Image (tube, grey):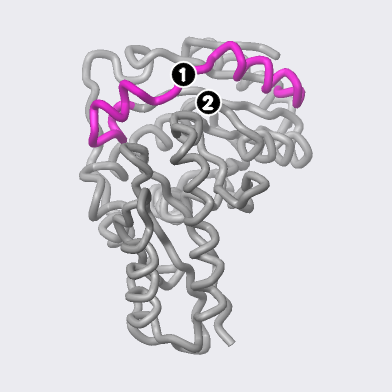
Amino acid sequence: MKIFKRKSEIKEFLSTLKKNKKSIGFVPTMGALHQGHLSLIKKAKKKNDIAVVSIFVNPTQFDNKEDLDKYPKTYESDVALLESVDCDVLFFPTVEEIYAENIASENFDFDGLEHQMEGKFRDGHFDGVGTIVKAFFEIIEPNTAYFGKKDFQQLQIIKKLVEKYKLQVKIKGRPIFREEDGLAMSSRNTRLSKKYREAAPFIYKTLKKAKNKFGVKNPEELTKWVEKQFKKHPLLELEYFTIAEEKTLQTVTEVKGNKKYRAFIAVFAGDIRLIDNIRLKNN
């Protein structure tokens, strides 16, 4: 596996491959890799000639400096995992390499997608996401980029970014990877204390029950039901639960037959914030 820290060096290396008609699959990450990340890399390898992974903890997408400071950094074990799946290229730049002396986001208009759910609770988050993803797409120039559906809102926003800026990259969303007890895999899970880790699978269990009740209860009733479940839980604190239409991400009050819906949730396990979502069947 080749490791690059400078934009100029990775651009030069990849441009040679592109001249030779090699396709590039790209997986951007913030490190602390888990099996969900590895599934994306395996798909990138299977569908492309070269798999490129970036590890970069992006400061502009954190609205909470403490969360940024505490974000797990596990470079050595990450490299070992990347080598275990035969990743071809790792891009591991510093903050200075990406932002120079101006650590700030661009401002984006994602046609309202950025104002839903996470956007309501994490000020400026999606401007930071858009800034770094656009920068990496311009550096790597991948044919296809792969993202997990755990961050479904982010996935939709990146699709919108590509559409609005006419970027020449295909975006592929991949299924959520879960632990055996159902908890969605996340780099933040490593920060959970034992009691919170044992409690956290309640999130997915509640989502599955909500999915079964969808169509029997209307969205408002279902939201109230989920809120009630978490009020009774001694450890987990619900930040939001919402049922939204997949394309616009807008919260819905009534269900229509020709639309696709998804339930989204954010929960605090102590000071660790966990998100998840589930596709809802609309019969």
User: In terms of depth relative to the viewer, which is nearer, 208 or 24?
Assistant: 208
Determine which quarter of the picture holds residue 43.
Answer: top right
Helix, strand or loop at disc 1? Answer: loop
Residue on which the image places disc 2 = 32
On screen, residue 184 above or below 212: above
Badge 1 amino acid: Lys
Q: Residue at x 63, y 47 (%)?
A: 177
Residue 174 lies, in percent from the top left, at 62, 50
Circles 2 and 1 in contact, beta carbons < 8 Å: yes
On screen, residue 82 above or below 218: above
Span of residues in magenta: 59-87
Q: Residue at x 39, y 69 (%)?
A: 226
User: In terms of depth relative to the viewer, which is nearer, 45 or 24?
Assistant: 45
On screen, residue 248 above or below 21: below
Badge 2 amino acid: Ala
The image's mark for residue 73 is 1
